[in-house]
Image (cartoon, rainbow, N blue to C red):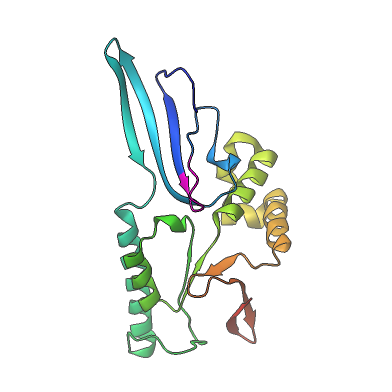
Amino acid sequence: MLEEDLTAHFRIIFPLFENGESTAIGNGGSLRDYDHKLKACRILEINGSNEDGVFGLLNDCLSGPQTPEKAKQSSFVALDVRKKRFNSFDKRPNEKEMPSILVLTEFSHWEQKSQNMIKSCLDKNFVIDDSVIVEAFESFEEQFGADFYDKITKDNYEKDADVKNITDSILNKYQGKIFRDIEDGILKKIVIIDGNVEFIS
């Protein structure tokens, strides 16, 4: 049981994991301390107090209204490009010439309706697992300190040897297979073979 003094700017995280376990994480803890996949999560933020009690805000940290908008935007882009190239909105079986590919993170945000939309409009939809993202963030934080997030850019990957080494080491560890296909759940890597995009499991 969590026993800590509640003060202004205190927060408590209430995660529910996919294995059914739940807990409460105080100010000194982090979701990064847990290996389980997240199913739902809320954060109680304490903003102040008086003699009658405390002032707090309970935030729902998962699925929000932005997710359907992201699904629509990515789907409309794929449809628009396909229409201009092939004069048809319809997906073509085993598309090789110009596959539309969407890569997602934080997949727990994506409710079924949004998943159905991208599946019907895009050729391939992949997820990078939270564990890989956390591993990358921890490696960057260890190398660059608290301001590591600013290092995570395409430009830095091309110009900063340390950024490239961290990124490549993670990719090599998983043999490039960091893209989980949401259709079959299999990890795959994306490669170019004879000018065609291939997905290798």
As rendered, which of 101 and 11 lies closer to the eye? 11
| Numbered range of the magenta stretch | 16-22
The percent position of residue 157, horizontal first and vertical second, equals 64, 55
Nearest the viewer among 85 and 7 is: 7
For residue 44, what is the image quadrant?
top left
Q: Main secondary structure of the magenta part?
A: loop
What residue occupies the far top of the structure in this picture? 51
| Magenta stretch encompasses residue 195 | no
Question: Residue 64's x, y, as percent?
Answer: 32, 51
Kindly identify the residue that appears in the image at 32 percent across and 27 percent down: 56
Residue 9 horizontal side relative to residue 26, left or right: left
Residue 31 drawn above or below residue 69:
above
Above-or-below relation of 70 to 34? below
Residue at 30% across, 16% down: 53
Relative vertical location of residue 143 with respect to residue 44 in this rendering, above or below: below
Q: Is 21 a magenta residue?
A: yes
Indicate whether 134 appears above or below 45: below
Rendered location of residue 1, percent (x, y):
50, 28
Rendered location of residue 71, percent (x, y):
35, 65
Quadrant housing the C terminus: bottom right
**Farthest residue in the left direction?**
52
Q: Residue at x 64, y 68 (%)?
A: 177
Left or right, 105 with respect to 63, comes to right
Residue drawn at (37%, 82%) of the image: 82
Residue 121's image quarter? bottom left
Does residue 29 appear to the left or right of 168 in the view shown? left
Count of numbered badges drawn on the protein: 0
